[in-house]
Image: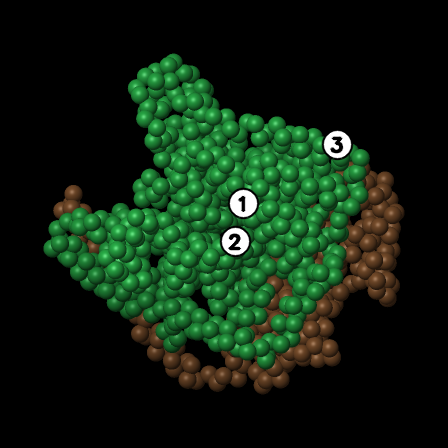
Chain colours: A brown, B green
Amino acid sequence: MRIATSRRARLGALAAVATLAFSACGGGSIDDATEANESQAAESGGECGEINMAVNPWVGYEASAYVVGAVAEDRLGCTVNYKELKEDVSWQGFGTGEVDVVIEDWGHPDLEKKFFAEEGDGSAEDFGPQGNVGIIGWYVPPWLAKEHPDILDYNNLNKYAADFATSESGGKGQFLGADPSYVQFDEAIVNNLDLDFQVVFSGSEAASIEAFRKAEENKEFLIGYFYAPQYFMAEVPLEKVALPPYTDGCQADPQDVACDYPETELKKIVGTEWAGSDSTGVDLVKNFTWTNEDQDVVAAYIASDGMDPEDAAKKWVEENQDKVDAWLS
Amino acid sequence: MSEAGPGTRARVPVEDQQLVDPPPTRPIEPGAPPPVVENAGLSRWIPALAVVVAWVLVYFFTRGNHTLDLPSLSRTDLHDRLTGVQNGLLEGRSTNPVMQFTNAIADGFRSTVDWLQRLVSKPAFPRPVPQIGWLGVTALATYVGLVVASWRIALLVLASFLAFGVLGFWDASMDTLIIVLISVLLSVVIGLPIAVWIGTNARANAVVTVFLDLLQTMPTFVYLLPIVLFFGIGTSAAVVATLLYALPPIIRIAGFGIREVSTTTIEATDSSGQTYWQRLFKVQLPMARKTIIVGLNQTTLAALSMATLASFVDGPGLGKPVLQGLRVNDVGTAFVPGALIVLMAVMLDRTTTAASERSERVARGGTSNVARRRLVVIGGGVAALVAVYLSRTYVTLAEFPTYSVGGRISAGVSDVVDWIKDNLGGVTGGTKDGITEWVLNPVQSVLAESPWFVSFAAIALLSLVFGGLRALVITVVCLLGVWYLDLWHDAMITLNMTLFATLLVMALALVFGVWMARDRRVDLGIRPLLDAGQTIPPFVYLIPVLALFGPSRFTAIVAAIVYAAPAAIKLVADGVKGVSPTTIEAGRSTGQTTWQEITKVQLPMAKGSLVLATNQGLLYVLSMTVIGGLVGAGALGFDVVYGFSRSEAWGKGAAAGLTIVLLGVMLDRITRAAADVRRDDGPGPRRAFNVRLPIGPPR
């Protein structure tokens, strides 16, 4: 047994070495590449340096972040460090220099209070809109809007309340609340509009998407909090239910909200220290702006076609040189 | 995913005699009737039933009053005060001396990880590739497997490392291994001294146990934000989060091993006038060696189970692609890296176990031909070094070639899940609705819609019935804590889901456990599935489970069962297997049917294991609470996710986390007390309780 073991081991080792020797012949030399890298590093000046780009956990954000990152790397020679973080952690990182850019912010009054100069420690600042417009609201799957068009008006929702009931909604109609990361007033809206609904929270974006997908496939009744731009809208184009229109101040008291969500200009937030540096990346981020359609294209590359975010971004950048040039001028 | 992970199987050879019920010591004469097992348990069900009936009666007259219901997105003053603590830390971060100290430590972690990454997983500039390429790393790892264990293990290691690369996750796998390695090393350095302390000092043990309970049951989402404050984002946070979760098993298990060293031995050696240190290093540590290694094994698996959670704060490794799969709602994308985590767990588990067995043999002087071994060690070493050299020279040997097989597996898994969804969707929906309406909702009403003091009194009385006075005291303390934290209503909903899921887990455990114990082939066939169920990150199967059941409490229960049932099944199977064959033979000779044999002999004799399985089932299920919050189960799990997602609600998340801890301690102590009442269990289960205590997946 012992003898067999060690002999086998020796044979194995020999075989391994032999295979290596053979396969090694095919490979290029690492030394050459190293020298090339060294000389390249000597040539290019470090005008841009490093950009720490937060990547918040949704596909649309990934699209924005990697497009900016691709331009920064390929055109400005920056080193972009992508950091996968939730919103709160990203903002915490501005003060320590671990995060420089949040490229798509949906509005975080609480974080602004903590980190903007007026009330907080001044480690972060608003870098203007990035062009996308967030359309938050109550949505239903398309089959439902088609079959019962009157459902798109909140006044008719009570008529269908019983159809929306699920095992979770305690006899009332179920309204599917979203990931708790998002600002939601649905419990108040349901109350104040006297809707016979119960808000049930999906708890995550994945759960909400899967619920809408299932509802469309099986023609189930479902109404819930959703938003655009979102890659899923390309797969299942949800229809928005009209609530009383948003007016200034109608969301002032969370308890009294009885109106729709406002259209939200998505913003860029950057670290104050980085914004004050002479990195050429600062102007790129400052100038970056694109549309919901642009983002949807890249998001679809990632989510539907299964591309790497980096490859998806490069593809879009190649196809849209004119837009990219505008950011760099 | 868990520390009881795949270890349970591999440990059996080492642990056989201790973990599983020892065969009864009562002498059994051949041909005698099977021993009469006292039905001590039955009588307790009568007062328990009385309590429940009274509870339901009171519920009918008082329901809906004083339920302490708090809307999902609302917070109380207490929660805001807790948030204030976190905000205070944040505001003072530039001047806080503790944070400056911890940030210095974090820098150390960062540079260590970075150095190791340049060594094996990321380009070491100006080189286009890491210092050591895949071939060198694989050869070295295989060589280590060969030297510390056996050629079988070496093959397993070789296959695993090749799989990391062929499936397209070489870099991520190396990163995960680096984080696990560092955390385990630190766990040993920090944990062993504490283990010695609690192993030799009863009072220290009592104090430290409280902290260990806290660390093992507190959901990670609660402490990720503070960790980021103290240690920064990324690798350093990943190391610390992993360390905190991996530390308890080694302290607990090693401490228990040291405590268990027989007093006779210590007294005998003491009489020869040894010093404290002599006693420790010459007697206690060597005699506890086996148990300490079990602890090390469990610590390693616990560390691996944090891989996905650490990625929530940009921790490197296989967790990132898993979370990407969740982001694009594609089970296929998450499956391959998830499966690699399972493979890594199996590899680490089998290797550490085999290594400890080998060193055991060596310690006993059972080594073979020294010359031959020397040849293997030197020859293998030279071969590995040659491989390292080659991988430093040629690009193809440094950078793993790209294969399409990983992508094809992803697509295949997605297709299979789609097929299941399309063909089973109707059945699953009906099951969910039926169970929710007829079981889940009625019980939840009694628990959560009774006035809080009614539920309080009823639960306390039940704990008295099942666990006696000690359990009552602990239950009252825990429930008072739950009440104080302002999340009573959510806690009752979570408790309901936990109890129901555990019931299903135990039903599965009884069926499959007995089946496995009675048929070796079934055992061999099912074990790998159980290992996978315990170690695969829950984020991988969330999407298919959601697709089948939609966001609901039942979905959360299904997810919890996938995770918790394997552990319970293994414990029951091992317990039933441990029933002495003599006893079974005796029964057979009296003409018992198979059914009688199972219900009258095997199960009653293995009841220590059944109680243990229930205890572990409860804690495993409870540890999935936060995952439940992500799939629409609401209650405490949602509160934790809410607190992690929005800084203004951190306090509510923390309160929910503490509530989960209190529920865990309460359920644990009641089941332990219930086990202790049955005095005829022998030391087996009691030992097992100590060796496998509260274990959880990343939450």
- The three-letter amino acid code for the residue at tag 2 is Asp
Q: Earlier in the sequence, mark 1 or mark 3?
A: 3
Image height check: is B587 above or below B357? above
Say which chain tag 3 marks.
B
| The furthest residue to the top | B591
Q: Residue A214 in the image: x percent, y percent?
A: 66, 42
How crowded pointer 2 is (Cα within 10 Å; few <14, some 14-19, many 20+) is rated as some
Residue B55 visible in image: yes
SS state under label 3 = helix
Q: Residue B653 in the image: x percent, y percent?
A: 65, 58
What's the residue at 61%, 28% (across, down)?
Answer: B46
- The three-letter amino acid code for the residue at tag 3 is Leu
Residue wearing tag 1:
B668
Q: Check whether the beta carbons of the residues at disc 2 and disc 1 lie within 8 A of each other.
A: yes
SS state under label 2 = helix
How crowded pointer 1 is (Cα within 10 Å; few <14, some 14-19, many 20+) is rated as many
Residue B301 in the figure: left or right of residue A139: left
Residue wearing tag 2:
B213
